[in-house]
Image (cartoon, helix red, strand yellow):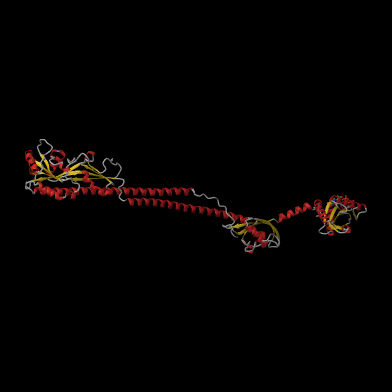
Amino acid sequence: MHDAEDLGADTAPVRSWSPVGGVFIAVALACAIGAAFVVWRHLGQRHEEQVYAHLASHSAEVVLKVSERFHSYRMLLRSGQAFLRSREDLDLAAWRTYLQRLSFQEDFPGVQGIGFAQWILPDQLEAHTRAMREFGSSDYRVWPEGQREFLSSIVVLEPADWRNARAIGYDMYSEPVRREAMDRAVQSGEAALSRKTVLVQETETDVQAGVLLYMPLFGDGMPVATEAERWIALRGWVYLPFRMASLMRQMLDQHRGQVRMQVFDGIHAPEALLYDSHAGMPESATGQVSTERAQLGGIEWIIRLEALPSFDAEPDIRQAEFISVVLVGVLLVMMALFFAITRERAARLARTTGSLRRSEAKYSTLVNLAHDGIAATDADFRLTFVNPGFVDLVGRAESQLLGHALDELWADGSGESRELILARLEEGQSKRYEVRVTRGDGRQLTVLASLAPLNDGWGRMKGVIALLSDITERKEAERRIAHMATHDILTGAVNRLMFGELLGYALVQARRSGHRFALLFIDLDHFKQVNDELGHHVGDLLLCEAVRRMQGSIRSSDALGRRGGDEFVVLLPEVGADKDAEIVAEKIRAALEKPFVLEGREVRISSSIGIALYPEDGKDEHELMCRADEAMYRAKLGGRNRACRAR
Ligand SMILES: Nc1nc2c(ncn2[C@@H]2O[C@H](COP(=O)(O)OP(=O)(O)OP(=O)(O)O)[C@@H](O)[C@H]2O)c(=O)[nH]1
């Protein structure tokens, strides 16, 4: 037997997301976002490290640059020292010429000048002042005024511009910061850098911190192995004054604006601040900072670099990384979603498939157990599926049915044409009608056929579903009930009610067409005696046989009715001449006169018949019936066994 496929299935409504699927999606999304955040944090930390490494590298670079710069300054001082040492008489004019030709400001940027401070014992001051005035500086004097144990005086400072000219004659040894550096230079015999001070060249505007680098000059050929010898041999200091802002500005060059540089003298404190590229700006507590220490001329400088927001090692890479992280995050989220959706769809499909299977099994069982015949056909009405009930109903094997048109089973002339049925089904209408089916054993059944179209996904009819119910017994019962309602149960003659209907109909027809009809009223003679002598059941048998004889005496278009007891009426719908009704009455009388053999005994009986004709004897049922009854009564009075016409 075929599966009951294509007969529909109950698919339970399916949730769009199962709770498990929803949790999975939430977890996947959280993981994806978490992973993207971790990567982002990691990249952020790496970037911070890169920035710091870059800043530290730049910081080391600055220290190296400063160290190299001071090394070259020392070389400059040494060259000055060497020049002056070679001259017995401190030939300042020659040295000035030498310095002017040196163009040191171009080769040694950041230097305010190069000068020589002469070491003067107090008793030499007067001669010194006189010699200097003779040398060309008429207003030369050593300042500040006052008695001091030791003196020094700036005697040359190139370039001899207005700013440096302010320093000529200044006794740097009188000022503690400079003095400390000058002493250190003599003590070490090497270049010594002063601590933070303010140059005497400063005016009232743009005052900057300043430092000075001293190189001691000893008398040529004098012993300088010990400090005491060096003090004896001391002739003065070749020195370089620096304005810190002018000096340090050139150290930042490529990162100017991106990095804040501060230089402190020995300690990280406001009072030790030598230089600040962003003066007045508060120091950042959270930003990237690199601090380096530089040893310069016996002094330690702290060089602090602070990355400003615009400082970024690799901004393009940083941007690319950011885009990558966002893309990877989006990709992860999309992958998680895609995976979750695919998983959910698979689960939904599995649920639907399971539901369909269960539904199919359920319907298959129902179809196979159904008592009624269930069948499916193709679009041409050819059977493609029949259930066991169908096979039993039509009494033919499944193999004899499949491939044959359903309406081939219909008895000839039963049901509508196939084309008409299919046309209605294609319009979407269901069809329900009674047909006669010829079974394989030749027996005919009355079947209620319910047909419904079976459509494909595009709404086109691809076949028909047929349900066949055997209603033969029901129809027979209906027929019997209808017969009982209209016929006499004992004799089968039309009953009083039905005869009234037929008479009324005959009257209508006769009135319309103008033809005549006849009504015969028949009463058996002495029937009571039969009952009394032979028994009631013999009387019944006689009544039945009498009806049979009367039926044989009239046409099939005539009607025989029983009024009750032994009274009968006959309707002759069409009579021509007057004699016609009398002839029929005579036939009936003669038929009833003949002896009856009932239960082996011969019984004789006769009949009295009254005849009424329409329209001569009556215009309606009641009148006709009365006239016929009267005529019958006259026949009785006339001696029975005769027929009388109404008057
Ligand atoms: N056996 C049988 N008898 C019936 C039935 N119906 C009525 N009868 C009897 O039929 C008889 C009718 O009698 P009546 O017509 O009165 O009298 P009758 O003997 O025929 O006499 P007349 O008509 O004057 O010739 C009655 O005895 C009824 O009991 C029936 O269905 N079966």
Tell me where residue 587 sits by quadrant. Answer: bottom right
Q: In the rendered image, is residue 371 in sight?
A: no
Q: In the rendered image, is residue 455 in sight?
A: yes
**Screen quadrant of the N terminus:** bottom right
Q: Nearer the viewer, residue 310 or 40?
A: 310
Q: Is residue 564 left or right of residue 119?
A: right
Q: Is residue 271 left or right of residue 33?
A: left
The residue under the point 55% across, 54% down is 356
Q: Nearer the viewer, residue 487 or 626?
A: 626
Q: Is residue 603 left or right of residue 349?
A: right
* Residue sticking out furthest to the right: 638
Q: Position of residue 12 (x, y in %)?
A: 55, 51
Q: Position of residue 300 (x, y in %)?
A: 19, 43
The residue under the point 45% across, 49% down is 25
Q: Position of residue 403 (x, y in %)?
A: 62, 64
The residue under the point 44% across, 48% down is 26
